[in-house]
Image: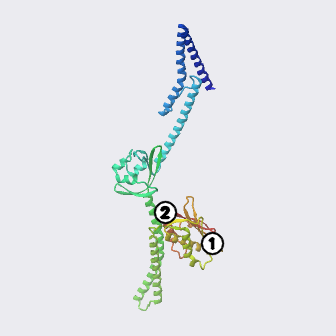
Amino acid sequence: MTYKRYTAGLLIRVLLLLAALVVLAFGIVKLNTYAILAGSLSGLFLLYFLHQFLIRRFVAMDDFFEAVKYRDFSRWFSEKHGPQDLRNLHKGFNSVNKTIKAINNERQAQFVYLQKILEMVDVGIIAYNLDSGAILWANESILSTLDLPAFKNIHFVEKRRPKLYEELFDTYRTEATSISITLKNEHLKVLISETVFQVEEDAFKLVVLQNIEDTLNQNESDAWKKLLSVMTHEIMNSIAPISSLAETLQQHIAASKTNQETTIDLDDLHAGISSIKKRSEGLMKFAKTYRSLSKVTHLNLETISVNELFTNINDLLQPTLADKPVELSFGMDQPEMLLEIDSYLIEQVLINLILNAIDATKRVAQPKIYVNATLNAKGRVQLKVLDNGSGIPEEIKESIFIPFFSTKKTGSGIGLSLSKQIMTLHKGKIQLKSEPGAGTEFTLQF
């Protein structure tokens, strides 16, 4: 309806201008001065108003586009004056301005929320332009960690601390890495991760820096406390009877020296010395066990097929399984699955888990152990050892990976701890899923 009125108004003006031109033409042909004056004046008048009629829409659009160009969305266009089509146009402009203002306000609110959140987290965050080095964003945490004042360009760091600049900004890392940086002649352990992203034609780099010195120290302290607690317990269990027995033998010898009538029973003396020797050998074995736990520090990686790995383990365990009723089977989701591992160490882990499973299925009527290879959600190979044994009680699940913790009378307590250490060296992890009476499942994720 609005456009019909605009078309009708334009048509009327054109027709009136045409009529004025006809009068002007008539006056020229007939040499009528009044007709020439009337036609000329009315034609100019109508031409002017036709121009105003057309141009005011373009002027309104130019004003709107100029406001958009300079992001001035506060401007208001009158919706009560002028022709109906122009008022509707102004209404559309105002609606667009209102929508953009609402979006801007929402984005501003989100930015403020994000800003407050990033300021509150105890993680250093900085984003900067890769070409110019201009800082897009840097929170207080990173300034505090690096002991730097607020700066606008990373080249400020390059001039002040070139080595720190090289470690943090001039090196690209594909994954999170822990590094040591030097600040005020002190070494600080930090975890750094970074990524590059594109905004229109500009490339930016986001660096996240976390001070892990205190966390590492706390974890190390807790680990030492646990280890020392276990070692103290084991050593005291061996030393207490040795000390008591040695004291008893010493008293017997002292009594025989002061009283010639008292004789030493050589059998008792031999038995006591044998007991001391046996417990001393136990302590030596304990020390060797601890040394073997701390010996694994590096890997000899090679690419090996899962089928070959399973075949080697099966061959190694056949003599052990010969006199046992347990059924051991292997399976794979795909026939040609490959792993890049230290095959010797992973074989040691799997054999240890299988031997534990054999022990767990002793009281089961039809003991079964199943070792299989599957692909996880990320498409990476994972190995599982499942049994239908007695399961692991809930109260000791958290303790089975602690060094020297064992539920077996003859166990050393380092098998699972060593397995966890080997998986950590492979940048993987070992997970436990167990239910008493229903069996146990260990998963090796690489």
For residue 14, the mark is none
Does residue 43 lie above or below 257 as drawn? Answer: above
> What colour scheme was applied to this rendering of the protein?
rainbow
Whether residue 401 appears in this view of the structure is: no
Question: Residue 330 at x, y = what percent?
Answer: 59, 70
Looking at the picture, tell me which residue is in the foreground, 267 or 425: 425
Residue shown at 53% from the left, 39% from the top:
106
Using the rendered view, name the quadrant where residue 184 is placed.
bottom left
Residue shown at 57% from the left, 58% from the top:
377
Does residue 113 lie above or below 422 as drawn? Answer: above
Q: Going by the picture, which residue comes out furthest to the right?
A: 365
Q: To which residue does mark 2 refer?
A: 427
Q: To which residue does mark 1 refer?
A: 368
Question: Residue 443 at x, y = what percent?
Answer: 56, 65
Residue shown at 37% from the left, 52% from the top:
165
Asked if the residues shown at circle 2 and circle 1 are in contact, with their CB atoms under 8 angstroms apart, the answer is: no
Other residues around mark 2 within 10 Å, as few (<14) / some (14–19) / many (≥20): few
Q: Amino acid at mark 2?
A: Lys
Does residue 419 lie above or below 36 as drawn? Answer: below
Whether residue 92 appears in this view of the structure is: yes
Q: Going by the picture, which residue comes out furthest to the bottom?
A: 261
Count of all numbered marks drawn on residues in the image = 2
